Amino acid sequence: MSSTAVPVTRGFRRLDSGQLLLISVAGLVAVAGVAHTAVAGLVQPEVAIGFGALIAAGELARLTMPGNREVAPIGAAAALGYTLLLDVGVTPAGHPALQVVAVLTVGMAAGTLPHLAVGRPPQLDAMSRRLVTGSLLAFAYRPLAGSLHAATEGSGEAEGSWTPALVVMVLLTLATLLVDVVLAAVLRAEQVRAAFGVAVHDELRMAAPLGVAVAASGVLLALASHSMDMAALLVFAAPLLVTQVAFRKYAGIRATYLQTVRALSQATEVAGYVEPGHSRRVSRLSVAAGRELGMAEPELLELEYAALMHDIGQLSLRDPIPGGATVHVGGEQARRIAELGAEVIRQTGVLERVAEIVRRQCDPCAEMPPLASRIIKVANAYDDLVGGSTDRDRAGAAMERLRLGSGGEYDPAVVDAVALVVGRLGHR
């Protein structure tokens, strides 16, 4: 179970309460910004249009990173640059915070329309988070822009300095990046039922590096506009585009890799060694239990790979186990199957840790196998006993059997985590 959200229509998901709150706040801010700008008029319209066009292009080229994280690096850097702008050439940038919100809103909407036209709606919570964090920075920074610009120009015979402006830019940008990480962690913790601390750690590890790169690009774009005028947009768009292409290829490789593992895991089902859907169910239950136990995202990915391929060793059997249920066979035979499966996985040359998880999935708790191995052992035993049935009595009997084996065969903490997941699924 990788997410608590379930599909309701093509491309759209049912939203959690935190997502709805964030989208509502973003909607109110967007309406206020557009309405104010429509009444007051655009300040320096050519600058607003230029940055708005780059924001739209970035939104058009958005991509999905591992963990189903939707990002738009080019658009985010352009939005940050417009927010931090002090001047364009020799002309001071006098646009207010609400105009920044309006340009962000219109640019993001314009970049989203082509996606909507071909049936690829955006993740509304991700768009809303980008708008809300961008607005927070604008409201904090734009009131200071006039005095910071004056400091760069100096007064009388005193020579101006960019140091105060740069310090304020960096500090406020870092604070905004931290707020964005916290918001993303709150949403992710609610979506996938992960512990908040684990969600924060995952966001810092997976999303923060890209966020720091975008923040640096936005600050440099604002500074470069002082000497390069509007040409800074074109100069900075090219390297950002190259970087985004590299990230897109990386995300594509990760997605293809997981699809390959999933296809390989179905070999035991196609050959008739295990029941249809067994590997997928064990994988979902294992990942959900791993989240309950506070595993980080990289560990969950390894757990998912191992759970999908945990029974691949059965392909070496001359006579298949009835129903593929290894819970009913002796410990030595189960270990032999696990070792054969681990040897197959090692042949890939890149999944050594996954192979070790699979190899030790049948070890008793006293031998201290990895947590992922203990999780797969419980999830596999549960699915061997229940299969695809939704009978609550059967599920309850299976959990009782697992609890009787707690402490020796099965890790009690893992059994409790699986019971929580099973109970939640039964409730839903």
Image (spheres, helix red, strand yellow):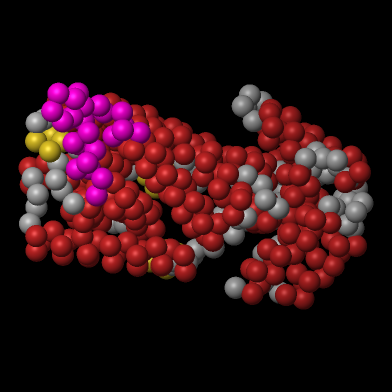
Q: Residue at x 18, y 51 (%)?
A: 96
Q: Residue at x 47, y 69 (%)?
A: 17
The outermost residue toward the front is: 157
Q: Quadrant of the C terminus?
A: bottom right
Residue 115, position in %: x, y? 26, 52
Give 170 or 337, whichever is nearer the viewer.
170
Residue 28, position in %: x, y? 28, 66
Give 187 or 168, whichever is nearer the viewer.
168
Residue 224, position in %: x, y? 21, 27
Q: Residue at x 24, y 38 (%)?
A: 148
Residue 339, position in %: x, y? 80, 34
Q: Quadrant of the N terminus?
A: bottom right
Q: Residue at x 74, y 33 (%)?
A: 356
The boundaries of the magenta stretch are 143-167
For residue 41, above or below residue 169: below
Give 286 or 31, whichever is nearer the viewer.
31
| Residue 122 lies in the magenta stretch | no
| Residue 152 lies in the magenta stretch | yes
